Image (cartoon, rainbow, N blue to C red):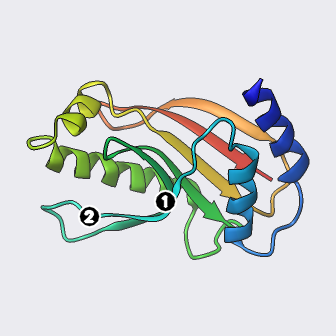
Amino acid sequence: MAVQIAAWELCSRMGGAFENETSCGEVFDECVSGVLEKGETNCELKPYLLSHYGKIDWCIQEADVLIALREDKLEFGHGGSDPYIQIACCYDLVVEVLTDHSTKDINASNFLTHGALCFLICLIGTWRHSLILASVDLIFPRAHVVCVWWVL
């Protein structure tokens, strides 16, 4: 029943215009509150061995492992990047961080062993289309990723 309520809320509330990415994300959080737990905002990722880092708009962690990532964009090109490419790059960084931690952290090691499954969610605030659900095999050899795009 919670999934049906979340779907109804998403369809009825996410179609409106939003002032900014933050307000869009807040409404999304309210809509899916019965299905997804409250996530953290502005999660930072930095592998031990690499000089780059990533910042994710929203994430859910369980046992210090990221299991859901969300990228919020007011529109395509806003902020200088494509949200689908950005979320894929963030996922790649998640796998790098987990690989770094896997020698010391049994949770990270187990997560990688089971394929590093992760929900990738993109919110794009000015398009008016529909919810697209897809299961995508990415280039990463150990990953099968379930992607959810909410395109408004």
Which residue lies under the disc numbered 1?
86
Q: Residues within 10 Å of mark 2 (few under 14, many from 20)?
A: some
Quadrant location, the N terminus: top right
Q: Work out whether residue 130 or residue 70 is closer to the camera in this orientation and state it.
A: 70
Secondary structure state at the residue bearing disc 2: loop
Q: Is residue 129 left or right of residue 117?
A: right
Q: Is residue 107 left or right of residue 116?
A: left
Q: Looking at the picture, which amino acid does disc 1 mark?
A: Gln
Residue shown at 32% from the left, 54% from the top: 93
- Answer above or below: position of 115 versus 23: above
Which residue lies under the disc numbered 2?
46
Q: Is residue 151 left or right of residue 35?
A: right
Counting from the top left corner in percent of width and height, residue 147 is at 56, 38
Q: Which label's residue is closer to the chain start, 2 or 1?
A: 2
Point out which mark residue 64 bears: none
Q: Looking at the picture, which amino acid does disc 2 mark?
A: Lys
| Number of marks drawn | 2
Residue shown at 42% from the left, 36% from the top: 138
Q: Quadrant of residue 53?
A: bottom left
Q: Residues within 10 Å of mark 1 (few under 14, many from 20)?
A: some
- Answer above or below: position of 83 versus 8: below
